[in-house]
Each structure stands twice: as C-alpha cells, then as structure tokens.
Image (cartoon, helix red, strand yellow):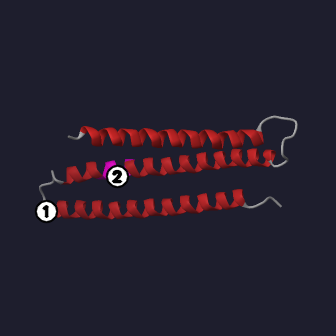
C-alpha cells in the first residue's frame, strides 16, 4: 500500500540530489573557468582571492570568539547548577535563604555578563565585516 508512495518519494529525492549536484558542477565550472591559472586571468581575480582569505580569517576569528563565549557560559552554568544542588542539602532556614539569595544574584550576574559578551561579540563581528566590505582607501 505504501510502496508506491515511498518509491515516488525516493525518486523525487534522487532527482533533487541529482539536480543539486548538476547545479553545483555548473557553478563550480563557471567559477574555475574565470579564476583558473591561464594567461588571460581577469585583473579582479587577485582581489577576489584576497577578499576570500580575509573573509575566511574573519569568520574563523568570530567563530572562535563565539565558541569561547559559549564555553565560558556553559562552565559558569554548570557551577551554578552544582551550587543549586548543594543548596538543597542545607537544613537551617536562614542559611538556606542567604544561599538561595546569593545563588539567585550570581545567576542574574552571569546572565548579564553573557548578554554583554554576546553584544560585544556582535559589535566586534559587525565592525570586522564592515571593515572587510569597505574598500581600502
């Protein structure tokens, strides 16, 4: 009963994949035809290659900054979770209230720091991309 449906879906997916491969091959052949190392290289190929290199460096740097920021947030979050589990072990009500308040304040402080780091990373990325896309004077 479902075999014809699955068969038609399989054929559609295969055709889609084939179309994407053909499209990519055509695009790649156009790109390499304009940039290949022949005698008649267009003058803009060197500029494109420099831009690609700078773009790669910029994206790599932004990605590293994002990873470091996420790792810092994750580590701080894990510490907060561990401290939250230790709060449950406290028997004294006053100590419990004090530790809960400290934990709450620290959590919001960490959230503020994470938010600030994200804004700074975004501003840094935008300024680098603007610098990259702005023609050199």
Q: Residue at x 38, y 49 (%)?
A: 74
Counting residues from the start of the chain, the first of labels 2 and 1 encountered is 2
What range of the chain is rendered magenta? 75-80
Q: Residue at x 70, y 46 (%)?
A: 52
Q: Residue at x 76, y 43 (%)?
A: 34
Q: CA distance from mark 2 to mark 1?
A: 25 Å
| Secondary structure mainly formed by the magenta segment | helix
Q: Is residue 89 left or right of residue 46?
A: left
Check disc 1 and report its element: helix, strand or loop. helix
Looking at the rendering, in which quadrant would you find the N terminus? top left
**Image quadrant in which you'd find residue 90:** bottom left
| 117, 62: nearer the viewer | 62
- Asked whether disc 2 touches disc 1, contact meaning CB atoms under 8 Å apart, the reply is no
> Residue 66's x, y, as percent?
51, 51
As for residue 78 lying within the magenta part, the answer is yes
Looking at the rendering, in which quadrant would you find the C terminus? bottom right
Disc on res. 80: none
Total marks placed: 2
According to the picture, the residue beneath numbered tag 2 turns out to be 77
Considering only vertical position in the picture, is 71 above or below 107? above
**Image quadrant in which you'd find residue 26:** top right
Q: Is residue 34 left or right of residue 55?
A: right
Q: Residues within 10 Å of mark 2 (few under 14, many from 20)?
A: some
| 101, 68: nearer the viewer | 68
| 9, 88: nearer the viewer | 9
> Residue 75's x, y, as percent?
38, 47
Check disc 2 and report its element: helix, strand or loop. helix
Disc on res. 93: 1
> Residue 62's x, y, as percent?
57, 51
Q: Residue at x 54, y 58 (%)?
A: 121
> Residue 96's x, y, as percent?
18, 60
């Amino acid at each position: 009963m479902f075999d014809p449906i699955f068969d038609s879906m399989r054929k559609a997916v295969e055709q889609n994949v084939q179309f994407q491969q053909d499209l990519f091959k055509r695009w790649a052949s156009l790109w390499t035809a304009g940039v290949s190392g022949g005698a008649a290289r267009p003058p803009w190929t060197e500029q494109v290659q420099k831009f690609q290199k700078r773009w790669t460096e910029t994206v790599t740097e932004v990605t590293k900054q994002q990873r470091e920021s996420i790792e810092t947030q994750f580590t701080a979050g894990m510490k907060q979770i561990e401290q939250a589990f230790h709060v449950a072990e406290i028997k004294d009500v006053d100590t419990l209230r004090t530790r809960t308040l400290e934990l709450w304040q620290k959590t919001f402080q960490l959230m503020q720091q994470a938010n600030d780091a994200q804004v700074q990373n975004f501003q840094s990325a935008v300024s680098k991309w603007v610098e990259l896309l702005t023609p050199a004077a």
